[in-house]
């Protein structure tokens, strides 16, 4: 029981809540909070609040909006942040126990990824060592039929239903050739007409981490 509970806790998402306010403490809406080096970002609500998940201790946020020109903020190991902006500059950054205690309240519907994109870090959190198994467990609509990776909802025009698999733009025959530890993002594309006949069954496009 203890081992199972521990494994679940390790694989669960970890919330990170924040708020962007002016010098008077009034929340600033529609501020984009991007995670540097990632495709993940959030947009603040009417009260200036935003939510993300699984933010590394050494991560940096890029704060941007009209009048706020891509200001960098260090996370510095905090689990929440109150960010004070004045005249387009960040003048104060502090953690907030109230925001931290809010859990996933500000994450829901505020953490944004392009449609069909999964982060490698989220796949590794499944504790699967095999990329194929991690994707099948994490990506809705992805399944394995007759030994082939198939994207449900994509009609096959070929004898095979196998999706086209690309790694940094180059075709590979299977996911077994890719280490889950090297994956930065995986994009599952249903409408893949730009790939011609080879993309008729959909595309799984994998981007590897740069060293």
Image (spheres, grey):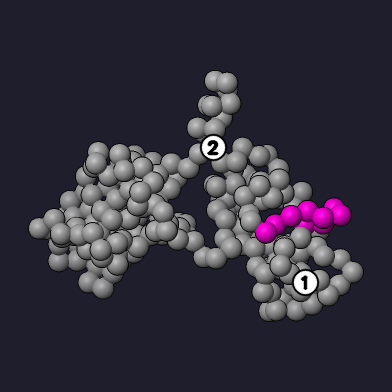
Task: Confirm whether the magenta stretch covers residue 171.
Answer: no
Residue at image coords 55%, 47%:
122
- Percent x, y of residue 71: 28, 61
- Residue 56 is labelled as none
Question: Depth-wise, is mark 2 or mark 1 nearer the camera?
Answer: 1
- Percent x, y of residue 1: 57, 21
Q: Residue 48: tell me if it is visible.
A: yes
- Percent x, y of residue 25: 13, 55
Are discs 2 and 1 less than 8 Å apart at CB? no
Q: Residue furthest right?
A: 159
Q: Nearer the viewer, residue 108 or 90?
A: 108
Task: Confirm whether the magenta stretch covers residue 146.
Answer: yes
Residue at image coords 59%, 47%:
123
Q: Secondary structure at mark 2?
A: helix
64 vs 2, left or right, is: left
124 vs 54, left or right, is: right
């Amino acid at each position: 029981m203890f081992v199972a509970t521990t494994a679940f806790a390790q694989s669960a998402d970890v919330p990170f809540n924040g708020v962007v306010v002016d010098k008077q403490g009034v929340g600033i809406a529609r501020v984009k909070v991007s995670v540097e080096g990632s495709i993940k970002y959030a947009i603040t609500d009417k009260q200036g609040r935003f939510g993300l998940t699984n933010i590394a201790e050494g991560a940096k946020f890029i704060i941007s909006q009209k009048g706020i020109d891509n200001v960098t903020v260090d996370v510095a190991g905090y689990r929440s942040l109150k960010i004070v902006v004045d005249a387009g500059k960040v003048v104060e950054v502090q953690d907030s126990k109230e925001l931290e205690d809010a859990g996933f309240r500000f994450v829901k519907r505020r953490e944004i990824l392009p449609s069909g994109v999964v982060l490698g870090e989220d796949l590794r959190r499944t504790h699967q060592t095999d990329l194929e198994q991690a994707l099948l467990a994490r990506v809705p609509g992805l399944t394995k039929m007759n030994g082939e990776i198939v994207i449900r909802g994509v009609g096959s025009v070929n004898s095979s239903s196998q999706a086209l698999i690309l790694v940094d733009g180059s075709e590979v025959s299977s996911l077994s050739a890719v280490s889950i530890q090297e994956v930065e993002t995986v994009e599952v594309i249903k409408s893949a007409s730009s790939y011609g006949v080879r993309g008729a069954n959909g595309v799984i496009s994998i981007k590897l981490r740069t060293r």
